[in-house]
Image: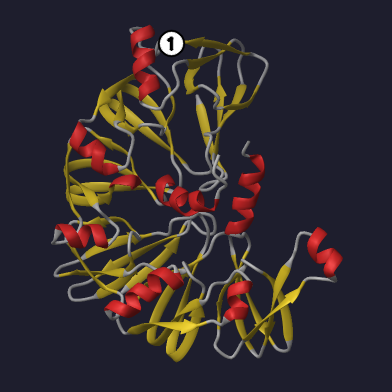
Amino acid sequence: MKYQMLCRPAATAIRFQLEQGEGITCEVGAMIAMSTGLTVNTTSKSRGGSGGIIKGLKRMFSGENFFLNHFTAQQSNQSLLIGPAMMGDCVHHTLTGGTMIVQGTSWLASTGNIEIDTSWQGFSSALFSGESMFWVKCSGAGDLFLSSYGAIYPVQVNGEYTVDTGHIVAFEDTLQFRIGKAGKSLIGSFLGGEGLVCKFQGQGTLYCQSHNPPSFGKLLGPKLRPR
Amino acid sequence: MEAEIRNRPAFANLIVNLQAGEKIVAEADAMASMSSSIEMSTRWNGSVFSALARRYLGSESMFVNEFTTSSTGHVVLTQPFPGDMACIELQGNTMFLQPGAFIACEPSVNLGLGWAGWRSYFGGEGLFRLKVSGKGRVWFGAYGAIFTRDIQDEYIVDTGHLVAYEPSINIRLGLAGGIFSSFFGGEGLVTRVKGPGKIYMQSRSFDGLAAWTNSHLY
């Protein structure tokens, strides 16, 4: 399977080229265009086999859709074009048996035997982080595709790194994280607009996004008509 | 202090590499991520009164954050809306910024509030504008891409599209065409800028987005 990232970083789309028998699992609604030799199978099961209704419901809570689309090529040289809902970037990550923890709506597509599972992040971080409370855990071996609002930039964490909570896209689970204050004082952190930030420790890859939807919404919201 | 604007023009963000003792001042909530060696401290944006004035009349935040380090590190600074960023190097001169445009500056730059006038207010550009002066670099952003133009005589900019301009520019409000075309042509009021001087414009307007979104709400 070959893939190509188009039109980064604002209107990113991914074009796949699949040979006979190859397949890819995508978020429902992600498909833009495809060749006629591809079959689409919509199930609530993730590719790894286990799944079903319960996992589908868990996925729904995390902001991901209940159903997943599995695209399989019945002939050779089939092309599939996918893209996320919002303006923003996409990034590719190779999973080699480890686990990647992905922010609620950022999972776009994955191949191979990658398990897609929703995990609970816990109350404290959810209340203050402004992110969705759920994370999607992707584990296994294969290609993983993530999307974001804003441009995605990777950071190789070796020691410690700080990210404003609305700006996390995904991180390897070899990283520990804790929620902390941005500056030296708690009041200063809130007045400074940063609030609480996420401090990552350890070694691993962290993907951040340059913009975050809540800040944009806070500016646009007051200008909208009440419904 | 090295600083680079990345991912232009749609999701521009600023990455600043700081060495020991170097400092950068940024508006509140501009930080996206930073090395753990960076220390952030929050202070009032000027005196208490000017900070309050800046917040309620200039749409700028009351507080600014100062980022510094005792070793090395980087900070990634961004803006709430998608768009481009630009950098101006001030050499003792002054620049006026529209509300919400300021992102960051070197600590040697002075941030002040200037009175924009009632004409500016009715033009949708706000009663106040941010005045940056002194020596050093200033980074500001826009919703959309940034265009620059050197004005000699007079030029017309649609309201909501002016981002920054030199103090030698005179702002006047006007109608786009006659009464009829202004009303039905959708342009309404426009800003007449009179030079000589340089202006920065943005290719999208936030009020345009709000109006479009409102028309689709039911």
Label 1: chain letter? A
Q: Is residue A113 visible?
A: no
Residue B204 placement (x, y as % from top left): 62, 59
Type of the residue with mark 1: Ser
Q: How many marks?
A: 1
Which residue is more in the foreground, B170 or A159? B170
Residue A32 placement (x, y as % from top left): 62, 28
Up the image or down, B8 lies above or below A41; here it is below
Residue shown at 61% from the left, 45% from the top: B213
Most extreme residue toward the front is: A226
Residue shown at 34% from the left, 46% from the top: A166
Which residue is more in the foreground, A88 or B154? B154
Which residue is more in the foreground, A188 or B17? A188
- Give the image quarter of residue B155: bottom right
Residue A194 placement (x, y as % from top left): 28, 56
Which residue is more in the foreground, A30 or A56? A56
Residue A20 placement (x, y as % from top left): 56, 13
Which residue matches tag 1?
Answer: A44
Residue shown at 44% from the left, 86% from the top: B90
